Image (cartoon, rainbow, N blue to C red):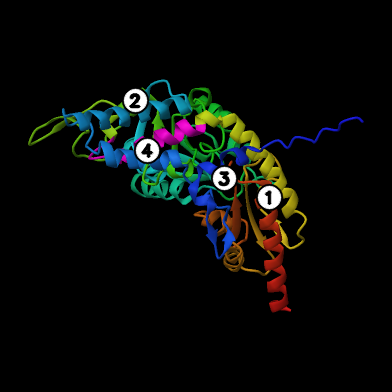
Amino acid sequence: MIATSTPVQTLSLADKVRADFPILTQKVHDRPLVYLDSAATSQKPQVVIDALSDYYQRYNSNVHRGVHTLSGLATDAYEAARQKVAKFVNAADEREIIYTRNATEAINLVAYSWGLGNLQAGDEVILTKMEHHSNLVPWQLVAQKTGAVLKFVDLSADENFDLAHYKSLLSAKTKLVSVVHVSNTLGSVTPVKEVIALAHAQGTKVLIDACQSAPHMPLDVQDMDCDWLVASGHKMCAPTGIGFLYGKLELMRSMQPFFGGGEMIADVFFDHSTYADLPHKFEAGTPSIGEAIALGAAIDYLTNIGMAEIHAYEQELSVYLYQQLAKIPQIRTYGPKSHRAALAAFTAGEVHPHDLSTMLDQSGIAIRAGHHCTQPLHRELKAQSTARASLYFYNTKAEIDQFIVALKESIDFFAEIFA
C-alpha cells in the first residue's frame, strides 16, 4: 500500500502572534471579538503591557534628574527606547528623535517652532485633500498668523495622490510640503520619495505623516530624505500618550523651543534662559516615561517579527478584503483598488455607517464609522461619513469572512426596514 501524506497547513502570521494579544481572546455580546479598527488604535501585546507595568512596579522614577538607582534605571530604559526608535526609522542620530504625546503634538511642534519663524505672507504650504485634521488644522492656525497660503493636492481619478497636480503646485513660493504617507480613509500610499525629491529641488522642506505607515511597513528616513516625520505609538502596539518626531539634526537645532520649562534648559536667569541641546530642547517637563519605555518594547516586538513580513502579510489581507467587499453589490469602497493599505472605507447605499457599525458590534465585530478626522476629504468624496474596516497583522482571513457575513446580514436587515 502506498502511504499518502496529509497536506501541511501553513500557519499565517496572525496564527503565530494572536496569543500575544490578550484582548483578542475575549467575547463581545457573547461573540468572539473581531477587531477591525486598528487604524484608530492597535491592540497591545503582553510584552508591551508587561514593560509598562514593570516600570511602575520596579523602577518608577523621574529621568535625567536623579543620581539614585531608580532614576538611573528609568533614564537608561527611557534613552534605550529612543535608540530603538532611531534604528526603527533609520535616523542618522538618536538625537533626531523627539518624544511627543502623539503625532498631533509632533506636527504642532513643527508648525509653531519652525512654521511661525520661517513662513511669511505669500509663502505657500502644500498639503493634500486627504489629510487628517492633525495635519491640517495646525497649518491653518499658522497660516492665519503668518499670512501663508495653503494649497491642496487633488485626488486622481482613482482617488489616489495626484502627482501631476502636485508638480503643478510647486513653485518658488512653496516653503513647506506636509503630506500623509498612507491615507487613513482611502488607504492610498503617497509616493513620498518622489514627492520629497521634487520639493527639495525647489529648496522646500517636507514633513511626512507616518501614522498609518510606521506600524505597517519598513521606514527609512535617510532613504526618503524627509526633513521631518511623525508617528503615534498607540497605532503601532505601544500605549497611548506617546509618539515621536524625527527631524534632521541641524534643522531641529535651528528651531526655537516649542514648550518652555524644566529639562529643556541649559541655564535659567531671571531675564533670560539658554537651552539644552537635542533632544532635550524639545522635551520640556516630566515626559511619559513608562509609555516611552513601552514604545521601545513595541518596537522590539515589531522588529522581531520583521516589518517586511508584516507588510507582505497585510498586503495579502488587503487583497482578500477588497475581493470580498466587491462581491456585495451595495458596497461602494473609496480609494485606489490596488497598491493600497489594509483598510477599507465604504458605504452601503442608504444604510448609515453608524447603523452598520452598531449592527456589526452585536456580532462582536468592531469597525469604525464617521469621518475619520478627514471631514474635507469626505466632502470631496460627497460622503457625509463612511464605515471603515482596518486590519493589522493579528487579523485573519477567517475574521474577514466573519465580517463579510455579518455585513451582508446587516445590509439585508436594513433593506427590509427600508422596503
Spatial separation of the CA atoms under disc 4 and disc 2: 23 Å
Label 2: which residue? 95
What residue would you read off at disc 3? 183
> Which mark is nearer the camera, 2 or 1?
1
Q: Badge 4 is on which residue?
A: 51
Q: Are marks 2 and 3 in contact (CB under 8 Å)?
A: no
What number is the disc on residue 398? 1
Quadrant holding the C terminus = bottom right
Query: Relative to residue 218, is residue 57 drawn left or right?
Result: left
N-terminal of the two: label 3 or label 4? 4
Label whose residue precedes the other's in the sequence (4 or 2)? 4
Closer to the N terminus: mark 2 or mark 1? Answer: 2
Name the outermost residue toward the left.
270
Residue 158: x, y in percent?
A: 70, 46
- Point out the frontmost of discs 4 and 2: 4
Q: CA distance from mark 2 to mark 3?
A: 28 Å
Badge 4 crowding class, 10 Å Cα cut-off, few under 14, some 14 to 19, many 20 or more, is many
For the residue pair 272 and 326, the one nearer the viewer reads as 326
